[in-house]
Each structure stands twice: as C-alpha cells, then as structure tokens.
Amino acid sequence: MSSRNSLQMQHAAKAFDDLLVAAIFRKWAAVAADTVRPARDARLLDIACGTGVLARELAARVGDPARVTGVDSNDAMLDVAAQIAPGIDWKRADAKALPFEDGLFDHVFCQFGLMLFDDPEAALGEMWRVLRPGGQMTVLVFDELDRNPIYKAIANVYEEWIGPVLSDSLRAAFSLGRRQDLTSLFDRAGTQPARIEGRHVLAEFDSVEALVNSDVRGWFPFSGVVLKQEVVDAITADMKRHLASHVQPDGRIVFRVDAHLATVDRPLTATGRGRARTRRDAIAPGALSPGDGASATRPV
Ligand SMILES: C[S@@+](CC[C@H](N)C(=O)[O-])C[C@H]1O[C@@H](n2cnc3c(N)ncnc32)[C@H](O)[C@@H]1O
C-alpha cells in the first residue's frame, strides 16, 4: 500500500474510533468485559480488536495494559490502537491463524468480528486453542437484520445510492444473527456448547448527518468508497426521510442495537470437546508471546 493510501486508512481508522466506536462499540465493550472477573495475573486477548476499545476497557479493569493483547488484520486499525494505548500488546494477525501457543490466555474475546471473517469456524477453533483450560471465551455478534430494522433501512439507502458494495458488507455484519447458526458454528469449531443470550445497547448520534458522516469517514474508505460531497448530501436527505421515526426532538438519533452475547467455558480437564483442536502448523516460527517487547507498540 502506498504511503498516501496508508495515511488515508489511518484517517479512516481514527474516524472509526472517534465516531463509530464512540456512538456504538464503546457501550458493547462494557457488556463484553462484564462477563469475566480476571485473576490478578490473568492474560486477556481481544480478537478483531479494531482500534482497541474492548482491549482498553479490559486493561482499565485489570489495571495493567501489558496483560492485554489485541489482534487485528488491519494495520491502520492497529496503528491507531497503539497511538491511543501504547502499553497494550498489539499484533497483526488473521484470526484463523493466531501466532500464540496453546492455552496462553485466560480470557479470549471477539467483539463484532466473527461474522466478518472469511473462515469463522477456523477462527473460533483458534480462539479455543489459545484459551487455557478453565478459561472463558466471550463473543459478540449482531442479531438478525430483521431484529435491527434501522440497519435494514440504512443498507437500503446505501444500496440505492452506491450499489451493493457497501450494502452487502453491512448486511454481512448480521449474517450470524440466527441463533441456531451461531450455535452450530461453535459446535463445528469443536468448542463446548456456547451459552447465548440476547443483549442490546442504544446507539446515539448527534444527528442523521452525524450518522452518515460516521459511515462515510469511518467505514466507507475501508471498502474503497470515497464520495463527492453532493452525493453525501443527497444520501443524508434520503436517510432523514427513512429514519424520521428515530429522530428525537433535539435532532439526535437514538436506536436500539440487538446482538447475541455468547460465552463458553473451557473445562479444566482436557478431554473430548474440552480439548483444543491444536493448529500448531498455524503458528509461525518465532511466534511471539503477549508482552513481548518486540511488538509492544506496533503490530508485527
Ligand atoms: C466491526 S470492527 C470491530 C472492531 C472492534 N472489535 C470494536 O468493537 O470496535 C471489525 C474488525 O474486524 C477486523 N477483522 C476482519 N477480518 C479479520 C480477520 N480475518 N482477522 C482479524 N481481524 C479481522 C477488522 O479489521 C475490524 O477491525
């Protein structure tokens, strides 16, 4: 990637953190972090960490950023994550090939990444492999699009104005919304059965303009979409018509986001399904451990 493109991606990642994380994902980080009570020396892993909102929440709760590792496949996301929280151990890796030894982490998290992976089954298998016996895995995925109707409307507006590239990727974010699909994914990945419960938060944007602007600046560039201002204005006007019922008297837009919170405990005895499906061949020679100074500030 050219340095110009890489700078644009960093701007997009910064906008993702400032706008989309602030409006939506920050609230979910508290929901995910509430599922564990880490021991004093626990090691925690956040897969598909993005700009690191959950990793930061976990670091604040355990009081030591060095005990937290964040993994993402996107350099720009990790660069911004490292600028915000240099003490956390950030690593670039694909979720389906984690560069860690078996059983290294006490708690493994994945907040709104699983449904975007090209091989979610392999990624879950990897997350299970690096989880120690007695540890816990926590996964958040969006509920079905029909249970998140505002996103259905948003996808339709983007499809109308921009075509399927963005609307398809937005709809893909809801592709693990059917609870039985999620259950069977954990099953195929070889974990213990997941406990799955429905949760919701309220997303809040200052205005419909702010909502569209968040997507235009913090999401579209990752899909290679850059729009002229007159197109953004036309989309915003159309979006105002479609989302009118969600706009508050003060102009803010507030809506419910529904998701599934899945938790799985790894049994202490490594028998049957409690046993990780080891994928040692996925570990690169010289794989690093959390806290390894070589990757403390920059993804490998
Ligand atoms: C919707 S964002 C969520 C980010 C973060 N967990 C949060 O809640 O703010 C999804 C993230 O998944 C990452 N991602 C997508 N595919 C991945 C893969 N195969 N391995 C690792 N990360 C991946 C993207 O780069 C992006 O940062």
Image (cartoon, rainbow, N blue to C red):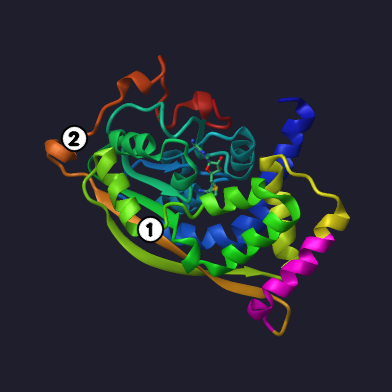
Q: How many marks?
A: 2
Residue at the extreme top of the image, as rendered: 285
Q: Secondary structure at mark 2?
A: loop
Would you say 266 lies left or right of 254 here?
Answer: left
Where residue 158 appears, as percent x and y from the top left, is: 69, 56
Observer able to see residue 207: no
x then y, percent, for residue 155 = 63, 59
The residue under label 2 is: 275
Would residue 244 be counted in the magenta stretch? yes
Indicate which disc residue 178 carries.
1
Q: Main secondary structure of the magenta part?
A: helix
Residue in the foreground of this view, choosing between 210 and 243: 243
Q: Residue at x 21, y 46 (%)?
A: 192
Of the 4 image quadrants, the one containing the C terminus is top right
Residue 295's place in the image compared with 216, above or below, is above
Residue 15's x, y, as percent? Answer: 70, 50
Amino acid type, label 2: Arg
Identify the image quadrant of residue 273.
top left
The amino acid on which the numbered mark 1 sits, given as a three-letter code, is Arg
Spatial CA span between label 1 and label 2: 27 Å
Q: Is residue 25 above or below residue 189?
A: below
Numbered range of the magenta stretch: 233-248
Circle 2 crowding by C-alpha within 10 Å: few under 14, some 14–19, many from 20: some
Q: Look at 65% across and 80% down and name the residue there.
A: 245
Residue 266 shown in magenta: no
Q: What residue is at 29 percent from the left and 33 percent from the top?
A: 129
Camera-side residue of 252 and 122 = 122
Q: Nearer the viewer, residue 65 or 17?
A: 17
Quarter occupied by the N terminus? top right
Query: Mark 1 or mark 2: which comes first in sequence?
Result: 1
